[in-house]
Image: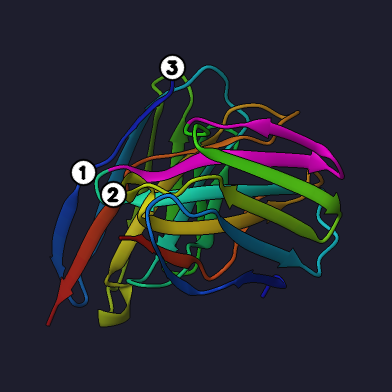
Amino acid sequence: DAGITQSPRHKVTETGTPVTLRCHQTENHRYMYWYRQDPGHGLRLIHYSYGVKDTDKGEVSDGYSVSRSKTEDFLLTLESATSSQTSVYFCAISEPLGQGNAFFGQGTRLTVV
Amino acid sequence: GQNIDQPTEMTATEGAIVQINCTYQTSGFNGLFWYQQHAGEAPTFLSYNVLDGLEEKGRFSSFLSRSKGYSYLLLKELQMKDSASYLCAVRVDNYGQNFVFGPGTRLSVLP
């Protein structure tokens, strides 16, 4: 199994507060992604990174920011959490060599009340 | 835009064969992936197609027709543990390695 760790695994937070989710990998993969998964929508890309300090927006990036200061860490920040950001968040990694399929972390269940 | 369609739910009997279809219309194509996701868990990689045709891996096979924008995942000799969601995903470009996922098909295997 790919070495990807997400923290925290569960979090309940109040509307308007900032929240940071962490993704840590031990695979030295170049690409890292943050997705959210909601019923009826599947996995939707929030932001991704193709290297240290190189990030770009995905399909649903409003209200989110990311940072990648080291190859192994990719942080997702909700600047001011809203109830619409209640979701399950998955981090994923991939490497452009070979098939390049994505490996996923175990997910973070975030509830904004 | 990007659009990937899959049936929402399917039901099949233990020991049977089931085919899960996926159609896609995307801005680019650099491979089609199938993932399995059990409830409350992370998606895990099942199969990959980049050329037309059938790829077989044990009880699982995946087919791709790029001209039709169509793929299917075939599961044989169904087992109870195959009850899960199956996600179809297209990698739309090589530079960004961007994956676009379908909504997933929830498969229930009944005894």
Q: Which mark is residue B7?
A: 1
Q: Quadrant of residue A55?
A: top right
Q: Chain of mark 2?
A: B
Mainly helix, strand or loop, the magenta region?
Answer: strand
**What's the residue type where badge 1 is placed?**
Pro
In the picture shown, does residue A8 fall above or below A93? below
Marked residue chain, label 1: B
* Badge 2 vs badge 1, beta-carbon distance below 8 Å: yes
Q: Nearer the viewer, residue B12 or B88?
A: B88
Per the image, the residue denoted by label 3 is B1
Bounds of the magenta segment: A41-59
For the residue marked with disc 2, what is the amino acid?
Ile
Taking A33 as reference, is A103 above or below it?
below
| In magenta segment, residue A54 | yes
The residue lying toward the viewer, choosing from B65 and A52, is: A52
Q: Could you say whether the residue bearing mark 3 is in a helix, strand or loop?
A: loop
> What kind of residue is marked 3?
Gly
Residue plotted at (53% across, 71% down): A106
Element under disc 2: strand
- The residue that disc 2 covers is B20
Q: Determine the secondary structure under disc 1.
A: loop
Instruction: Judge whether A3 appears above or below B87 on screen.
Output: below
Count of numbered badges drawn on the protein: 3
User: Which chain does the residue under circle 3 lie in?
Assistant: B
Of callouts 2 and 1, which one flags the residue occurring earlier in the amino acid sequence?
A: 1
Q: Residues within 10 Å of mark 1 (few under 14, many from 20)?
A: some
